[in-house]
Amino acid sequence: MSMNKPLQGVKIIDFTHVQAGPACTQMLAWFGADVIKVERPGAGDVTRSQLRDIPDADALYFTMLNSNKRSLTLDTKTQEGKEVLEKLIKASDVMVENFGPGALDRMGFTWERIQELNPKMILASVKGFSEGHHYEDLKVYENVAQCAGGAASTTGWWKGENSEPTISAAALGDSNTGMHLAIGILTAYIGRMQTGRGQKVAVSMQDAVLNLCRVKMRDQQRLERVGYLEEYPQYPHEMDAFKDKVVPRGGNAGGGGQPGWILKCKGWETDPNAYIYFTVQGHAWAPICDALGKPEWKTDPAYTTPQARQPHINEIFATIEDFIKDKTKYEAVNIFRKFDIPCAPVLSMAELLRDESLRKSGSIVEVQHPVRGSYYTIGSPIKFSELKPEVTASPLLGQHTDEVLEELGYTAQQIQAMHEGKAV
Ligand code: COA
């Protein structure tokens, strides 16, 4: 396997913290970039100490988002610290930050100043809301973004006790925004190859969430035009759900044109994840009937088209549930896969952590850390034929401070003086 790392030689100042920014720079580091994480002396990224499972060891929150990076401690509010950052800006290609609104300007590093220092610099930022937005001054965390970007209002149940807007466990606001930013950075980098100039790249968490809620914006417009959404579980028995012309929460319905639901398998009474997701794909109707032993549904006009089936969809799901009630989720999927039916077991984190296929593909990797020993992390979800990203341990706080300062031309005495002055 060739270990060509396409981003080798790209130097990135990683001025990020928590999750959105670190997820972006970690991915670029896997692909070969030299990512230098700039952290405040003494404390560093807050996630180093958040939700610790081992006293005095960097928390998994930090280690799982900062692998393959170097750590430089720098107090950028001191004169000496600012000078180091200036040198670093001159020597780098990209600077990524996700501070609260205005923090970089207050530090003295406005976009104008950065361009003066290095006209080729790409400055990449994550903020809660985009520039000029009426909420642009707000600080934002994951769940706030899920609410502001349309995910919370369209996730969850539309009736009953737990029918309030619901947050997804997937980091739609944080890591997803970081992935968008990585695309922006690479685009600006290719642009720079053409023009010789850097540029500012920004992704707001609200926009990144909204981008993933595209089908719900589709549904809003359909609803306003047509008055109902025929693939939602409320149709046709609970038409009241559409009366306000606002996309309702759809429970576990599929987001596309194929109805789907979470169905109980053997053991659901005691195992919270003994379920499968089953999709009633339009053109797989005949195989579904064969799999369920319901050949008569293949020709019954009450079932032959998606429109005809929708009024019976709950009855169809109940029939499938009855068919799988004595089968485990794995057995059920093993039956349905033979009929080419899109489905999967609901997998718990415990199952995913131990999944042999994920280990083999590098999607889950074991990493050795000098303080915490071995731990598992999520490897690159992007697979290449020429690059197998190797995940290495996250850096200890300030582990590479002296090394980076030396690379910037500081002498041993100057470095010592900076340590004594607490600038690094
Ligand atoms: N040396 C000196 N000061 C430093 C420093 C360093 N190396 N690194 C950061 N700081 C300072 C900043 O200058 C800023 O100071 P100021 O407010 O006095 O100007 C401060 O530390 C950091 O501020 P901020 O980023 O606002 O931190 P916070 O903990 O109050 O807020 C967030 C955290 C995540 C809410 C906020 O950063 C934010 O909204 N970020 C944008 C959206 C985002 O990425 N959200 C999180 C997704 S995981």
Image (cartoon, rainbow, N blue to C red):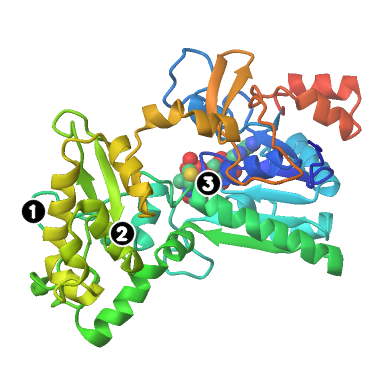
Q: Which residue is mark 2?
A: 287
Identify the image quadrant of the C terminus.
top right
- At x 23% / y 59%, what residue is drawn? 289
Asked if 417 appears above or below 339 in the picture, the reply is above
> Badges 1 and 2: C-beta atoms under 8 Å apart?
no
Circle 2 residues within 10 Å: few <14, some 14–19, many ≥20: some
Of the numbered discs in the image, which one, if any, rests on residue 160? Answer: 1
On screen, residue 254 versus residue 52, left or right, reads left
Of the residues shown, which amino acid type is indicated by label 2?
Pro
Q: Which residue is mark 3?
A: 20
> Badges 3 and 1: C-beta atoms under 8 Å apart?
no
Q: How many marks?
A: 3
Tag 3 secondary structure? helix
- Disc 2 to disc 3, C-alpha distance: 43 Å
Where residue 332 appears, as percent x and y from the top left, is 28, 41
The verdict on label 3 being within 8 Å of ligand 1 is: yes
Using the rendered view, name the quadrant where residue 326 is placed. top left
On screen, residue 168 versus residue 117, left or right, reads left
Asked if 156 appears above or below 237 in the picture, the reply is above
